Image: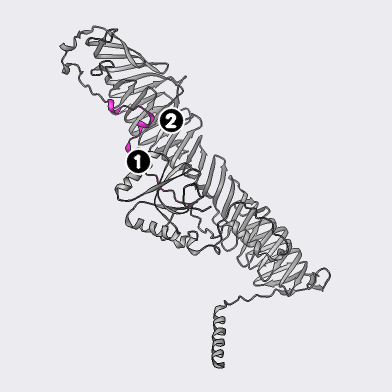
């Protein structure tokens, strides 16, 4: 029996020894130079008090030296209070000075206050109160601080500095001042070596010739180069540019934008919409493609112009707009199409080039070349020219069978109050016109040739025809004019191509453009713990003030559970977890939307577009679903919802088990 008990006791002792984790040895604070020594048990029970003589008091602890005028040292508790002209030096690169310091040797934690200055390589941090965690090699402040390096001066209400990473993290009222620009942000990560800034929340960068706003972005402060990927806007070169993703480079005087772009000309009040655009300041030009459209106001009516590619060049008041390939335009009562359009603001001439056609009301006009001329003073449409092989056709509005036609070498039109009111056909003109009496009964069909013809229009319909110089023709009863004689040579009716609305300027390919996936900003060292969590953790570790009530966390934002509180499967994604570069976003819970990880295939702002996309995926044998997010008014098409990050990542990296080869990304909907 005793033998059994002994064996059990032996096993228990061994098991206990294995189960216990080895505790790191706590090293004592060492007195290097004590100078004058005294004690004051009434005011500082258990403490040894050291004060300087001709030398300052000096202590050492785990590779750091501390000098001060007075030190109150609690040896049993392994902590001290330093007062007066303090210098804390760690290695050759980190030095902290202040008026007072509380130092805890058990936690390697210093709290410094009164004119605190932290120097590390080329960086200087100043604040009123600073906590320096030597175990983590992190310093943080909560009541305003300033960081200065060789290029920039940064201030914020809350901040952290990581000595090993040479990185600063600023929160609330962040301001970066550079000789060339100023940056204001809600949150900013800054690297003192590269001078790169990573922006979180509302951020504005203001330079001498530009202004950039975004709510997630990157900026290289050395060369004034960066981009934004959330609610981004750039005011640049008399233009305001917005889009899902914007890039800017001051040196090359270049900006580009991707997805849902608008470019507003602040001088001429013109607007461009597209899904890709480039702006060149030196050339004073804009290049736009992917469902690109230019919108300008003409006589209180919007003129829409589209082409596969749009290009605008020239100084303000002298802009030249070109629409290349599959060019179309639309305004009320006037529309047209051709291969390319050229508009010169200085001359007021709009040229339709290669196979042009325009519609004015029910009238179709074609020719080798068509020019629209504007009055330079009023900027109103003034006249129309159709050069060579001019043809005007309209459907007989009464009989709905025949066509009224006129042709000649050239056609000249006159606009009055934005209405095409007069048309002159010149040289070798011919007309076929259906005549009716007051009872809308067909009188006959007028077929005449003449040197010149004038047509008067009312409400975009031909009201009167005047034959000028030697007309030769007759009015034929309907039965006496065979069908093959009722069409002029060269007649082509293109009514099915007529542009009836601003939406008709886009074809099926334009409406089914798949937007480029905007990847996240790649912060090279994204810390696992949110800055708010880290500050809260530092407070809990601050044993120096453990007897006092901790002030409330100044960050009111709701926090995710810390890593210790989370099951491993719910951990936030990190670069090390992913097999490929992954775009990942998080969103708050919305009504009818279950928490989890959604594998997103595409995002649409227009209902008919996502319906077509879902239909195309269904034809491939997939079962896509969608949801609508109220906060940004977009439809999200997803392949599947997963409960864990690992499941979503595995599906994404396997191209949805080989069933979907296009780019996908992961959206996590939170449960709060």
Dot 2 or dot 1: first in sequence order is 2
Depth check: give the residue in front, 282 or 248. 248
Depth check: give the residue in front, 607 or 331. 607
Q: Which residue bears the numbered disc 1?
A: 512
Q: Is residue 274 left or right of residue 339?
A: right
Residue 119's place in the image compared with 199, above or below, is: below
Q: Is residue 523 left or right of residue 619?
A: right
Q: How far from the left and from the top, in percent, is residue 142?
A: 66, 55
Q: Residue at x 43, y 61 (%)?
A: 646
Structural crowding at the residue carrying mark 1, measured as other residues with C-alpha within 10 Å and reported as few (<14), some (14–19) or many (≥20): some
Whether residue 426 is visible here, answered yes or no, is yes
Asked if the residue at tag 1 contacts the one at tag 2, i.e. Cβ–Cβ closer than 8 Å, the answer is no
Whether residue 122 is visible here, answered yes or no, is no
Residue 335's place in the image compared with 670, above or below, is: above
Indicate the quadrant containing the N terminus: top left, top right, bottom left or bottom right.
Answer: bottom right
Depth check: give the residue in front, 520 or 9. 9
Q: Is residue 183 left or right of residue 614?
A: right
Answer whether residue 514 is magenta in the image: yes
Residue 403 picture quarter: top left
Q: Residue at x 57, y 78 (%)?
A: 20
Q: What is the chief secondary structure element of the magenta stretch?
A: loop
Residue 192's place in the image compared with 369, above or below, is: below
Q: Residue at x 51, y 63 (%)?
A: 567
Q: Which residues are magenta?
A: 494-523
Residue 390 picture quarter: top left
Q: Which residue bears the numbered disc 2?
A: 295
Structural crowding at the residue carrying mark 2, measured as other residues with C-alpha within 10 Å and reported as few (<14), some (14–19) or many (≥20): some
Q: How far from the left and from the top, in percent, is residue 7?
A: 54, 89
Viewer-side label of 2, 1: 1
Q: CA distance from mark 2 to mark 1?
A: 21 Å
Q: Residue at x 59, y 58 (%)?
A: 533
Answer whether residue 33 is magenta in the image: no
């Amino acid at each position: 029996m005793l033998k059994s008990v002994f064996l059990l006791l032996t096993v228990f002792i061994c098991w206990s020894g294995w189960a216990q984790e080895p505790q790191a040895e706590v090293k004592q604070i060492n007195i290097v130079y004590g100078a004058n020594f005294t004690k004051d048990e009434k005011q500082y029970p258990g403490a040894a008090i050291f004060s300087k003589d001709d030398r300052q008091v000096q202590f050492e602890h785990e590779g750091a030296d501390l000098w001060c005028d007075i030190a109150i040292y609690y040896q049993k508790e392994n902590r001290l209070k330093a007062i007066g002209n303090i210098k804390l030096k760690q290695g050759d690169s980190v030095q902290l000075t202040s008026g007072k310091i509380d130092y805890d040797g058990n936690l390697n934690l210093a709290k410094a206050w009164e004119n605190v200055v932290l120097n590390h390589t080329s960086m200087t941090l100043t604040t009123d109160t600073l906590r320096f965690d030597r175990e983590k090699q992190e310093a943080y402040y909560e009541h305003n601080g300033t960081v200065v390096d060789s290029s920039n001066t940064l201030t914020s209400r809350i901040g952290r500095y990581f000595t090993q990473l040479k990185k600063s993290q600023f929160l609330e009222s962040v301001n970066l001042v550079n000789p060339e620009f100023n940056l204001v942000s809600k949150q900013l990560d800054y690297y003192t070596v590269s001078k790169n800034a990573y922006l979180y929340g509302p951020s504005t960068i203001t330079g001498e010739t530009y202004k950039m706003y975004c709510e997630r972005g990157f900026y290289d402060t050395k060369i004034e180069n960066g981009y934004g990927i959330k609610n981004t806007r750039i005011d640049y070169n008399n233009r305001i540019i917005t889009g899902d993703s914007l890039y800017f480079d001051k040196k090359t005087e270049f900006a580009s934008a991707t997805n849902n772009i608008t470019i507003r000309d602040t001088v001429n009040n013109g607007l461009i919409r597209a899904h890709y655009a480039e702006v060149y300041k030196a050339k004073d030009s804009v290049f736009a493609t992917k469902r690109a459209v230019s919108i300008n106001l003409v006589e209180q009516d919007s003129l829409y112009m589209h082409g596969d590619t749009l290009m605008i060049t020239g100084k303000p008041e002298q802009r030249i707009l070109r629409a290349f390939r599959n060019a179309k335009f639309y305004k009320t009562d006037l529309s047209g199409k051709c291969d390319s359009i050229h508009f010169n603001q200085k001359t007021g001439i709009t040229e339709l080039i290669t196979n042009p056609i325009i519609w004015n009301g029910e009238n179709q006009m074609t020719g080798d070349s068509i020019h629209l001329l504007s009055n330079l003073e009023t900027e109103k449409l003034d006249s129309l020219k159709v050069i060579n092989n001019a043809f005007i056709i309209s459907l007989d509005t009464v009989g709905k069978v025949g066509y009224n036609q006129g042709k000649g070498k050239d056609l000249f039109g006159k606009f009055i109050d934005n209405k095409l009111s007069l048309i002159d056909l010149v040289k070798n003109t011919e007309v076929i016109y259906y005549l009716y009496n007051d009872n809308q009964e067909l009188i006959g069909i007028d077929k005449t040739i003449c040197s010149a013809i004038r047509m008067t229009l009312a409400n975009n319909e031909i009201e009167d025809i005047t034959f000028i110089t030697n007309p030769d023709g007759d009015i034929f009863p309907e039965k006496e004019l065979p069908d093959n004689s009722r069409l002029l040579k060269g007649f082509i009716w293109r009514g099915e191509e007529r542009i009836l609305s601003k939406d008709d300027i886009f074809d099926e390919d334009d409406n089914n453009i798949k937007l480029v996936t905007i990847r996240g900003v790649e912060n090279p060292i994204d810390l696992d713990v949110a800055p708010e969590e880290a500050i809260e953790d530092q407070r809990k570790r601050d044993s120096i003030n453990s007897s006092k009530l901790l002030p409330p966390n100044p960050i009111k934002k709701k926090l995710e559970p810390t890593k210790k509180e989370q099951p491993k499967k719910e951990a936030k994604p990190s670069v090390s977890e992913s097999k490929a570069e992954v775009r990942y976003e998080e969103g708050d819970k919305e009504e009818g939307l279950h928490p989890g990880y959604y594998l997103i295939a595409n995002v649409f702002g227009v209902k008919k577009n996502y319906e077509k996309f879902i239909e195309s995926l269904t034809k491939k044998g997939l079962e896509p679903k969608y949801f609508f997010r109220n906060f940004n008014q977009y439809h999200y098409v997803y392949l599947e919802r997963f409960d864990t990050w690992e499941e979503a990542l595995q599906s994404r990296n396997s191209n949805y088990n080989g069933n979907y080869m296009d780019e996908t990304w992961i959206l996590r909907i939170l449960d709060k």
